[in-house]
Image: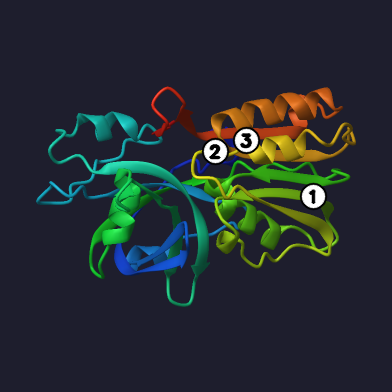
Amino acid sequence: MAKILRLMPKHPTLFRGEVVRSVRLSPSMRRVTVTGAEFADFSWQGYDHWFRLFHQLPHQDGFELPRLAGSKWWEPYFALPEDVRPHCANYTVADFRADTAELDIDFVVHCGPTGEPEGDAAIWACAARPGDPMALLDQGLIFDCPGDASEVLVIAEETGLPATAGILRSLPRDTVGHVIQEVPVAGDRRDLDAPDGVRVTWVVRDDATAVPGAAALEELRRRDTVDASGYAFVVGESTLATEGRRHLHRAGLPKDRITFSGFWKHDRAHDRVRTA
């Protein structure tokens, strides 16, 4: 995930907690709710507030966390032996309720030929039970809309849907713009709290063999011009992020008004996904 250093916490905090519940949110999404005493101090900023999630792997007997050394979390993390090192992946805060210190995390669940979930994080989310340990490292925002933006454009596939929802909920109510949100199936669409001036276009892939993000990119390319004083946020599969940025720049949007991040990369050679 891309980083904007000035939007990151100067002293990232590790919050330890446990699972409260795990529920199916839509055909392709699962929501895990977590909490803990330390979550009372979590300062949710809205928008695309993201974090690094640490959780136990199925073969591990215990849950061991690294000791942080400033912002260089990876050094103590990779110093842990592989047999006790927890899995780490990046996620967006789907929702946070300060009164109960509960935080929601939405997971995209890809399934194999026999219907079993694939990927360490999805497997954990689907199997999570109340009391299972976890932790998150606060990382701040990457959404960086200038105050003078004439419009806001958001383009994402399903891995960016939590960010899309958070951004729309957090935008000033007089914001104008356009969202292109791709999802695997129609049942993954959800109500979004968008300002009245922001149009939402849902792109339903409905093809298990299609590359995620390709349909959203095709929809974006139908827009030939972009207001140079606008702002765009393009996230999800690596090609969508990079090609989306390239198209927006060619259409007239300066590069410093485009935030893009490839959350993961599709491996076309083996028709599977590989985390970025």
Rendered location of residue 257, percent (x, y)? 77, 33
**The C terminus is located in which quarter?**
top left
Q: Upstream in the sequence, badge 3 or badge 1?
A: 1
The residue at 50%/66% (across/down) is 96
Q: Amino acid at mark 2?
A: Ala
Query: Which of the marked residues, 2 or 1, is nearer the chain's N terminus?
Result: 1
User: Is residue 196 or residue 143 the one in the foreground?
Assistant: 196
| Residue bearing the label numbered 3 | 214
Residue 133, picture quadrant: bottom left
Q: Residues at badges 3 and 1 in contact (C-beta under 8 Å)?
A: no
Residue in view at x 56 percent, y 55 percent: 185
Q: Residue furthest left?
A: 61
Q: Which residue is mark 1?
A: 178
| Alpha-carbon span between mark 2 and mark 1 | 24 Å
Q: Is residue 48 visible?
A: no
Amino acid under label 1?
His
Marks 2, 1: nearer the viewer: 2
Q: Secondary structure at mark 2?
A: loop
Residue 186, above or below 137: below
Q: Residues within 10 Å of mark 2 (few under 14, many from 20)?
A: few
**Mark 1 surroundings within 10 Å by alpha-carbon count, few (fewer than 14), some (14 through 19), many (20 or more):** some
Q: Which residue is more in the foreground, 178 or 71? A: 178
Q: CA distance from mark 3 to mark 2?
A: 8 Å
Q: Which mark is residue 210?
A: 2
Circle 3: is it few (<14), some (14-19), or many (20+) Cα within 10 Å? some
* Badge 3 vs badge 2, beta-carbon distance below 8 Å: yes
Q: Position of residue 52 (x, y in %)?
A: 40, 45
Give the amino acid at mark 3: Ala
Which SS class for mark 3?
Answer: helix
